[in-house]
Amino acid sequence: MSLFQVFITFFTIACALAVPIDNDKRAAKGIDVTLLATFNLMEQYAGAAYCNNNYNSANDKLTCSANNCPLVQSATTNTVSEFESTKATDVTGFVANDDSNQLIILSFRGSTSLANWLTNFNIPAVATTICSGCTAHGGFWQSWVDARPDVLAAVKAASAAHPDYKIVSVGHSLGGAIATLAAADLRNSGYAVALYTFGAPRVASTKLSSYITAQAGGNYRITHWNDPVPRLPPIAMNFVHISPEYYINKPNAKAVAATDFRTYTGSVNLQGNGAWLATDIAAHLWYLGGIADCSVTSFLGLKERGVEEGDSEGVEVVAKF
């Protein structure tokens, strides 16, 4: 059994039912196609953080060996900073310029190493410097603290070189947790940052969640089907999500349309992803595509999956903040 499976088994009880509770009545149904295009681009930037060529040497064009980030690869990109394995948390990712879409991208990798899993299990809440009395998951906060000097320096340099570019913070799984704290901290430093997370776990206390939710810049917390990771750590341990949740109401390995999204508000809700009584790790690895495909073979020993319908050709990406 992999460390990932141990982690999920430890915190979730898989029930016999394989359908969500029907409490969809208060959801805002669907999103506009422009926002969907942005989600596709941001999901691929989150996925690119799993590809080792994107975090082992700076000043590179971003590419994905698993061919799961065509929108990123078609853009004119260059990494300003790439970081990995320099601290005990093994926080890993990159800061890059996207000249095609006029973006500065902060992307954090999800869990692939033992150090990452030790970080996930470092659950006790700790004080943060984001706001007075605000606490966060200890491992997630330490990961951001470890990355912060390099990331801040890179963002400062990139912003000075491209003052008209918008800044986005993205990540999947553990990477989404770190991206959340990074966005909040950078906003406090005067940067306008849009946040996009995919399958992120709960990060914050109620006070910190409310603070981040109220910040300017835009928060897009995306969940999929019966992904177990957004259910962790449990609410009973006093961790909650930021709001809102953009829930993908579509099974695994199927192309996602704008009409497949449901939007829920509130730091604690039992709708969307939270409505499921049974969970499936495959839903964590598929969002708008195979988000962790660059590392999925070592991640869970899964084979590459195909899309049942649709493709990513001809998407006009317009970032929305």
Image (cartoon, helix red, strand yellow):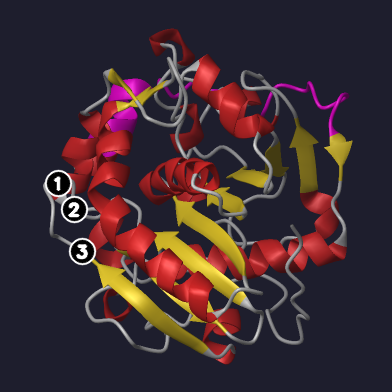
Q: Secondary structure at mark 2?
A: loop
The tag on residue 92 is: none
Please report the bounds of the magenta region as a residue range: 5-27
Q: Quadrant of residue 122?
A: top left
Amino acid tagged 3: Glu
- Going from N to C along the chain, the mark reached first, 1 or 3, is 3
Amino acid tagged 1: Ala
Q: Residues within 10 Å of mark 2 (few under 14, many from 20)?
A: many
- Going from N to C along the chain, the mark reached first, 3 or 2, is 3
- Going from N to C along the chain, the mark reached first, 1 or 2, is 2
Q: CA distance from mark 1 to mark 2?
A: 6 Å
In front of the other: label 1 or label 2?
2
Asked if marks 3 and 2 touch (Cβ < 8 Å), the reply is yes
Asked if marks 1 and 3 touch (Cβ < 8 Å), the reply is no
Residue at image x 79%, y 40%? 262
Residue 17 in view, yes or no: no
**Residue nearer the viewer, 254 or 221:** 221
**Residue nearer the viewer, 160 or 214:** 160
Q: Which residue is mark 3?
A: 84
Asked if marks 1 and 2 touch (Cβ < 8 Å), the reply is yes
Location of residue 98 in the rendering, given as x and y in whole percent from the top left corner: 56, 81
Q: Which residue is mark 2?
A: 90
In front of the other: label 1 or label 3?
3
Q: Which residue is mark 1?
A: 115
Amino acid tagged 2: Asp
148 displayed left or right of 288: left
Residue at image x 39%, y 11%? 237
On whether residue 249 falls in the magenta region, the answer is no
Location of residue 202 in the rendering, given as x and y in whole percent from the top left corner: 46, 29
Residue at image x 36%, y 71%? 294
